[in-house]
Image (spheres, grey):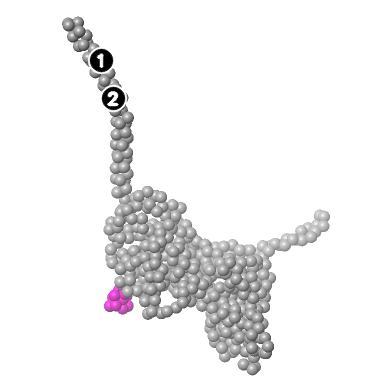
Amino acid sequence: MADTATTTDVETPEFLDTIKQSIDAAVKPLNDQITGLNQKLETQEQTLTEMKKPVKNASQLFGGGAPAVRQGEDSLSSRGYSYARIMQGIANRNFEKCKYELEVSQKLADAYGMQGADPGTVFVPLGGAHMQQLDDSDRAEIRAAVRQGVANVDIAEVMAIRQHMLGGVNQAATTYDDTNLGLLLGPIQQGEMIDLLRSKEIFTRAGATEFTLPANGAIRFPENQSDADGFWVGEGQEISETSLKLGAQSMYAKKLGSIVTYSSELVRFTSMATEAFIRNEIAYGQAKRLDITALTGVGTQLSPKGLLNYSNIVTHTASTVQTDGDVLEPEDIPILLAKIAQNDVDTEGAAVIMTPLLQATTSFRRADSVSAGDKRGPLVFPYTERNGVQTLSGARVLTSTRIPSDRAKGSSTNLTLVLAGVFREFLIGRVGVMEFKLNDQSGTNFKNDMVSIRAIQHVDTAPRRPQAFGIIDDLDPNGVYVTDSE
């Protein structure tokens, strides 16, 4: 018995160690899983802690990490840039909900040296392509934010707001006629102010070359005003020389401003649709003025010189000349384009601009058929459609009410003209910042609880080659040949 007891006492610790090792081996995978879970939980806690911190110039939209925490806003919001919010902040004297917009304003002011502006002035991005003073990441972020800011706009609501503001005016909507409300359609989704301006400016729609003015607002383009020549010579004979005559096209940023007035409620209790409406109104007013000046302006230190006032623009007289207004004939457009081509101008991509009335009367004008004046024959003008764009003699046809309708000849004072040309030879330079300021005190604004919004952009225009453009002037807008019997 004694021997048995002694043997058991000696073997018991080894037996327990064996059991412990077996248990440890069995539970090790479970312990490893628990350790892994604990590490993941710690990582998630650190991530949440970082997400709660404000992050400058970052948002989920742009792959820049967590969105900046904005006091008064949803900290996880990924909303885009809003022109209406910054206006609302100024109107309410409360900027808690537009801190991102104020941050963009300060960044633009620093980049373009505009820190000395009046209090209450904010700077908004004109367009990503024109914000050359910012680095690529800032420019890309702001551009994406502005586009996101109108992603959910309700076009029907925009139209209803505009009709209400205009006293219930009922007009047909078409995106191809700049006289109608249809200009509010397609471009709204694009978001950037420059997109809206481009959709409304007839020169831009016709294909003008657009570029960014430097921060100082001045640029000088060298231009060759004479061509080199070649000569046939014999062996050992002298080659004649030709001297190049160089000139320069100088452009300077000129201030284009507009003021629009709305009820305070429209600004303070704003929506996405209201934002689109406000931006479209501002863009429409500035685009209209820029087009009119770029076409007919006399040219001063404050405003561009209009294309019609350049001496070397091509002119052509309509084939049917009358005392009180000439009549545009089918051969006149190709003749004008040929005269432009005679100046060594490649007319590929040329455009023709006329008033909506003249375009309508020419497109439906018919030749006589059985008797003189019956107008029952075939259509006279060879209008065609190419890729959804109307063309005439191979040139795109655009209509605009900015084309003058007050030309005078004889007893008529309501005559018009046709403008044709290669519009890539027309330059539009802009600074990439637009200045906004609100005022509810001036005039009757305070008494009527109205708010005036002032918008300023810096821009200049000039034809690079005036001889790339031409006009047919003093045209009867009805486009009808008047016979003695009529």
In this rendering, the answer to whether 244 lies above or below 451 is: above
Amino acid at dot 1? Glu
Residue lying furthest right in this view? 235
User: Which of marks 2 and 1 precedes in the sequence?
Assistant: 1
Region rendered in magenta: 440-450
Distance between the alpha carbons at the discs numbered 1 and 2: 15 Å
Disc 1 target residue: 14
Residue sitting at x 78%, y 58%: 238
In the rendered image, residue 387, in percent from the top left (x then y), is placed at 58, 67
Residue 416 is left or right of residue 245, and the answer is: left
Query: Secondary structure under badge 1?
Result: helix
Residue 159 is left or right of residue 483, and the answer is: left
Residue sitting at x 39%, y 76%: 163
Query: Secondary structure under badge 2?
Result: helix
Residue 365 badge: none
Quarter of the C terminus within the rendering: bottom right
Q: Depth check: 402 or 313 in front? A: 402
In this rendering, the answer to whether 228 lies above or below 421 is: above
Residue 24 badge: 2
Amino acid at dot 2? Asp
In the rendered image, residue 309, in percent from the top left (x then y), is placed at 57, 76
Quarter of the N terminus within the rendering: top left
Residue sitting at x 63%, y 78%: 381
In this rendering, the answer to whether 134 lies above or below 2 is: below
Q: Where, by quadrant of the figure, is residue 485 drawn? A: bottom right
Residue 446 is one of the magenta-drawn residues: yes
Residue 39 is one of the magenta-drawn residues: no
